[in-house]
Amino acid sequence: MLGKTAGGLFWMFRYLERSENTARLIEAGFRIALTRADGDDDEWTSVLQTAAVAHLYFQKHEQIEASKAIDFLLRDATNPSSVLSAISAARMNARLVRTAITREVWEAVNDTYMVLKQALARPVSARDLPEVLALIRQQSALVRGAMHGTMLRNDIFDFCRLGTFLERADNTARILDVKYYVLLPSISQIGSNLDNVQWETILRSVAGMRAYRWINQGESNPMGIADFLIFDTRMPRSLAFSVKKIAANLGYLERNYGLRHPCHDQIDVILARLTHNTIERVFEDGLHEFITDFLTDVARLGHQIETDYRFLG
């Protein structure tokens, strides 16, 4: 496969996943804001920082306001990670690799672009926000369903999946970091009812509440939730699940092309760190520090994949 085609597939699905993940990040911030009695907008600072777009936001706005932050994350063309920017970039990449994807996948991507462009044609009110966020998730699922139902399991599929799970691993780590590092206003609240509600909000934002309660018989605590989102390979948005999928698809590419690249060694190291670690050790050493190291590793891996398969930039 030409590097240009591989890169188009990889980034098409990174952007598709990013559009949904940005919506999930907004939902996490929105729900946590509802738990605050003071009505402060400080949580949106952390959401923007987590999305790595705070510097862009402050180029347009002098201070944080919930409505402006939400609009920036959903619709702003100057924000390359906004939902509308991401889905536009996904559609552009889909057009570039049109002959490599099925008609159903192309139609699903194009439909998603048109539906979300209409839904985000104007600022979204707080009243309509849950419905719009649900629509973004639904459209993302539509594309995934078309991909799983119609595409061959070949190198094309592997590059699509690499883009999806690199982006997903990055996002789940960032959502965890929002809760732990920034949104908790005081260490005195750790273990409080507010603390537990906010951790459960993180579960909801990654569609994990019901699954977590099934496994844990309705009981929840911060360490258990973090363990579920980091190490549980049954959870499709956990770090361990995403890393295992990346390793599997890189393994398929290695066998398909008969070549082993530095990215294969990198993913083996990341997978080993997750496999041989425990949540007790993570909390002892610092969850934020663990997440920071993980995000750095994932960013390096993504760059190495682009380099090894010659579609960098």
Image: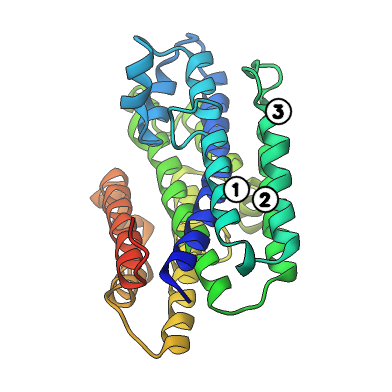
Q: Please tell me whether residue 221 is drawn above or below residue 279 in the rendered image.
A: above
From the top left corner, tell me how far across and down residue 308 is, in percent.
Answer: 31, 72
Q: Nearer the viewer, mark 1 or mark 3?
A: 1
Determine the residue positioned at 30% across, 79% down.
261
| CA distance separating discs 3 and 2 | 15 Å
Residue 237 appears in view:
no
Where is residue 300 drawn, in percent x and y? 28, 59
Three-letter residue code for mark 2? Val
- Residue behind mark 3: 119
245 on left or right of 147: left
Q: Amino acid at mark 1?
A: Arg
Say what secondary structure mark 2 lies in. helix
Image quadrant occupied by the C terminus: bottom left
Q: Secondary structure at mark 1?
A: helix
- Badge 1 or badge 3: first in the primary sequence: 1
For disc 1, the marked residue is 91
Which of the pair 120/140 is nearer the observer?
120
In the image, 267 versus 145, the foreground residue is 145
Q: CA distance from mark 1 to mark 3?
A: 16 Å
Asked if residue 184 lies left or right of residue 201, the reply is: left
State whether residue 280 is above or below residue 120: below
The residue shown at (58%, 60%) is 236
Q: What residue do we see at 45% from left, 41% from top?
A: 175
Residue 109: assigned label: 2
The answer to which of marks 3 and 2 sits earlier in the sequence is: 2
Q: Amino acid at mark 3?
A: Ala
Assess whether mark 2 and mark 1 are in contact (beta carbons under 8 angstroms): yes
Q: Which of the two discs, 1 and 2, labels the residue nearer the N terminus? A: 1
* Residue 80 versus residue 110 in the image, above or below: above
In this image, 83 relative to 246: left or right? right
The residue under the point 65% across, 54% down is 211
Of 258 and 225, nearer the camera is 258
